[in-house]
């Protein structure tokens, strides 16, 4: 590649976008980035963008949406129990030995970990 050529790799696309977004520090000194009217922790923006760009829902998908600290774990456990009530008996439920976050993973982080998508 010539010195003046632009590399259109996903990483460069993300870096270009990042330079156009408002950034500040939150109350504990961590960097936050404003994207589409919402403030994201810096470490979360890339997975969110990747999900928006690459996720394709199926008719059978169930998507939970909660705000942090609003009962997300409880909602994940309830949803897993309802969706799998005919698969596991109550005394063999994976919820007895596994965290609901493991059984019902976060969409943004599952996509980026499993497919290594940058954006």
Image (tube, rainbow, N blue to C red):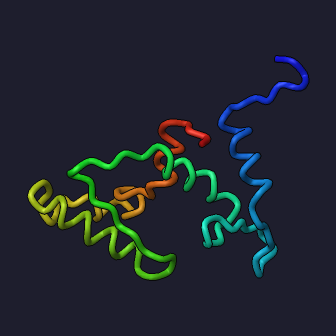
Front residue of 100/15: it is 15
Left or right: 100 in relation to 37: left
Q: Quick one: quadrant of the N terminus? A: top right
Quarter of the rendering containing residue 35:
bottom right
Q: Residue at x 63, y 57 (%)?
A: 45
Q: How many marks?
A: 0
Q: Residue at x 17, y 58 (%)?
A: 84
Residue 28 locus on image (x, y percent): 77, 78
Give the farthest residue toward the right: 3
Give the farthest residue toward the left: 86
Front residue of 119/107: it is 119
Q: Residue at x 55, y 37 (%)?
A: 116
Residue 51 locus on image (x, y percent): 49, 50
Residue 19 locus on image (x, y percent): 80, 54
Residue 32 locus on image (x, y percent): 73, 68
Left or right: 109 in relation to 57: right
Q: Quick one: quadrant of the C terminus? A: top right
Quarter of the rendering containing residue 98:
bottom left
Q: Residue at x 77, y 67 (%)?
A: 22
Left or right: 24 in relation to 91: right
Front residue of 41/71: it is 41
Give the answer, above or below, for where 25 lies relative to 3.
below
């Amino acid at each position: 590649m010539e010195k003046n050529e632009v590399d259109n790799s996903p990483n460069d696309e993300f870096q270009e976008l990042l330079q156009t977004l408002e950034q500040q520090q939150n109350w504990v000194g961590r960097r936050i980035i404003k994207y589409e009217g919402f403030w994201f922790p810096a470490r979360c923006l890339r997975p969110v963008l990747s999900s928006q760009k690459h996720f394709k829902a199926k008719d059978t998908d169930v998507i939970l949406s909660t705000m942090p600290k609003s009962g997300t774990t409880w909602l994940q456990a309830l949803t897993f129990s309802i969706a799998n009530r005919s698969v596991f008996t109550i005394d063999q439920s994976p919820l007895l030995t596994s965290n609901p976050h493991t059984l019902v993973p976060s969409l943004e982080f599952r996509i980026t970990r499993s497919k290594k998508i940058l954006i």
